Image (tube, helix red, strand yellow):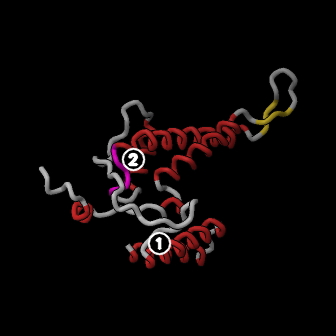
């Protein structure tokens, strides 16, 4: 796990040195990793809203790996679903997370489509009755979907800050901690 942290930190530092314009976001990610690494050395997780607390060794673990997108999704949404499944850490998304991932995917799709319309027509348009300039009707859609994306992404562990609060154990290690594994 520590090696993974070091690789992530090195990748963030490389992006900063390469001139990535999101300096604030990259520095925030670095500070999250630094606090997490120090907390791991002390044996507990930091970076939680309520401060430091011990890692829950008896956390319930949902079964079943999340894989196929729901049939009702559009082709664009299915592509977003597949992207999330392919790029999420192995073992992170479970079948129980289906509805949260669906909310993220649909919001991402609507956000992209609204963004395309804002790009096409601009942030201002003419009011139909008066001809006066008004805000594009796509802007509230764009902003609302961005809020939904961020909220769902935080719940799913898709943001740099939320990733510091999760651990994905290898299945073999998980069985070692499970007192019920021998019953059957």
Q: Residue at x 37, y 39 (%)?
A: 69
Magenta: predominant secondary structure element? loop
Q: Residue at x 81, y 30 (%)?
A: 126
Q: Choose the circle earlier in sequence order: 1 or 2.
A: 1
Left or right: 131 in relation to 58: right
Q: Residue at x 25, y 65 (%)?
A: 173
In this rendering, the label closer to the viewer, 1 or 2 = 1
Quarter location, residue 30:
bottom right
Q: Which residues are magenta?
A: 91-95
Q: Is residue 103 magenta?
A: no
- Mark number, residue 82: 2
How busy is the neighbourhood of tag 2: few (under 14 within 10 Å), some, or many (20 plus)?
some
Cα–Cα gap, marks 1 and 2: 23 Å
- Taking depth in this image into account, of 178 and 100 the one nearest to the observer is 178
Q: Point out residue 132 in the picture as x, y percentages from the top left corner.
A: 87, 30
How busy is the neighbourhood of tag 1: few (under 14 within 10 Å), some, or many (20 plus)?
some
Mark 2 lies on a secondary structure that is helix
Residue 33 in sight here: yes
Q: Is residue 9 above or below residue 112?
A: below
Can you name the residue that lies furthest to the top here? 129
Q: Is residue 50 above or below residue 18?
A: above
- Taking depth in this image into account, of 178 and 171 the one nearest to the observer is 178
- Taking depth in this image into account, of 51 and 70 the one nearest to the observer is 51
Q: Point out residue 38 in the picture as x, y percentages from the top left corner.
A: 49, 77
* Residue with the mark numbered 1: 8
Residue 7 in sight here: no
- Taking depth in this image into account, of 90 and 168 the one nearest to the observer is 168
Left or right: 26 in relation to 140: left
Disc 1 to disc 2: CB gap under 8 Å: no
Q: Point out residue 14 in the picture as x, y percentages from the top left corner.
A: 54, 76
Q: Quadrant of the N terminus?
A: bottom left
Q: Is residue 89 above or below residue 12?
A: above
């Amino acid at each position: 796990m520590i090696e993974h942290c070091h690789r992530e930190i090195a990748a963030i530092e490389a992006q900063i040195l390469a001139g990535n314009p999101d300096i604030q976001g990259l520095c925030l990610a670095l500070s999250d990793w630094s606090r997490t690494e120090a907390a791991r050395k002390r044996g507990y997780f930091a970076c939680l809203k309520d401060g430091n607390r011990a890692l829950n060794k008896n956390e319930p673990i949902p079964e079943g790996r999340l894989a196929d997108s729901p049939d009702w999704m559009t082709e664009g949404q299915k592509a977003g679903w597949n992207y999330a499944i392919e790029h999420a850490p192995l073992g992170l998304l479970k079948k129980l997370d289906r509805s949260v991932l669906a909310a993220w995917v649909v919001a991402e799709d609507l956000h992209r489509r609204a963004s395309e319309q804002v790009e096409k027509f601009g942030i201002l348009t003419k009011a139909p009755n008066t001809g006066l300039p008004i805000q594009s009707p796509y802007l509230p859609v764009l902003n609302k979907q961005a809020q939904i994306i961020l909220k769902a992404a935080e719940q799913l562990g898709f943001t740099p800050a939320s990733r510091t609060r999760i651990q994905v154990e290898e299945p073999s290690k998980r069985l070692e901690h499970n007192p019920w594994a021998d019953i059957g």
